Amino acid sequence: MTQDDPLPPLRDVIERHDLRARKSLGQNFLLDLNLTAKIARQAGDLSACDVLEIGPGPGGLTRGLLSEGARKILAIEKDARCLPALAEIADAYPNRLDVIEGDALAIDPLAHLTPPIRVASNLPYNVGTELLIRWLTPKQWPPFWDSLTLMFQREVAQRITAETGSKAYGRLAILSQWRCDARIVLHLPPEAFCPPPKVSSAVVHLKMLPEPRFPADFKTLEHVVAAAFNQRRKMLRSSLKSVSPDIEDMLAAAGIKPTERAEQVSLEKFCALAREVAKA
Ligand code: SAM
């Protein structure tokens, strides 16, 4: 259900409310509403979903999500200067936008959302990875959200979706892909933003899996993966010595050569190793 956006162009909104971008808040705004609608579409059909948006800023993506039919949006914005512009959007789309002023790291949004819930955001770069890790590591799985559609710096997007053996493969890839399908759905050049950042960006779509892809205890998997990638150039028999004195036997039982390095080990094999470590 696509709806025409009834509001003035974003450039006018930014000028009228004097919303000069602040670097300290990671502010790089999207001004092209065709592009924000395209990003919103990557989150799928939102007509029966509540959407959590972190950092709406002047509201480019918020407007894209609403015009693409989101049932309801909860937006959390730290910069109070953006609130009047967001109030205009709330008026134009009655009962479909709630805004909370504050730090997304300090606010529990759950009381304000009704499932099914999807997250869609052009994340501030300074808190983006921390928020993603929180969403991927809740106390209980399945999490409160069905999917995450998130804009990151391209390098972070590549780390989330990296394949075994690639330079970007590491803890973030394992954490993301263990319990989600994760893929890059859109690339954006710096000029898509105002002001343009130094690097390119990409939108990642993560769809949660009701069960982890391979069985493993989360804490053990985290421990093993952290130890392996903290010394990623070393062979596993040496980088994982701190995990157990019997690590060579455990590696063998998991089908991993002790001379391999972390980036050569698939998610499936890391899970097998975590099960061996947990057994002991
Ligand atoms: N969504 C807008 C867009 O796409 O044009 C703005 C995106 S801009 C990259 C990031 C936004 O996050 C800014 O509006 C900034 O003020 C806000 N922000 C920064 N840190 C935040 C935090 N800790 N909690 C909530 N919002 C934050």
Image: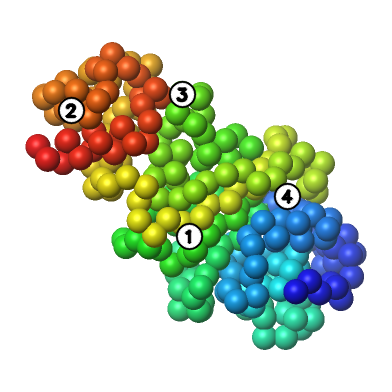
Q: Earlier in the sequence, mark 2 or mark 1?
A: 1
3D distance between C-alphas at marks 2 and 3: 21 Å
Q: Nearer the viewer, mark 2 or mark 1?
A: 2
Residues at discs 4 and 1 in contact (Cβ within 8 Å): no
Nearer the observer: mark 1 or 3; the answer is: 3
Q: Residues within 10 Å of mark 3 (few under 14, many from 20)?
A: some
Residue linked to disc 1: 105
Sequence-first disc among 2 and 4: 4
Q: Position of residue 149 (x, y in %)?
A: 60, 55
In this rendering, position of residue 31 left or right of residue 128: right
Residue under pointer 2 = 253
Check disc 4 and give the amino acid type: Asn
Element at label 2: helix
Who comes first in sequence, dot 4 or dot 1? Answer: 4
Residue drawn at x 49%, y 63% is 146
Q: Mark 4 and ligand 1: say if the CB distance to the nearest ligand atom is below 8 Å.
A: yes
Label 2 – label 4 distance at C-alpha:
49 Å
Taking the spot 70% from the left edge, 35% from the top edge, the residue there is 199
Q: Amino acid at mark 1?
A: Leu
Dot 4 lies on which element?
Answer: loop
Indicate whether 202 appears above or below 225. below
* Residue 167 x/y as whole percent: 51, 24
Q: Amino acid at mark 2?
A: Ala
Query: Residue tagged by mark 3?
Result: 165
**Residue 28, label in figure:** 4
State whether residue 256 appears in this view. yes
The answer to whether marks 2 and 4 mark residues whose Cβ atoms lie closer than 8 Å is no
Q: CA distance from mark 4 to mark 3?
A: 33 Å
Check mark 1 vs ligand 1: CB closer than 8 Å? yes or no. yes
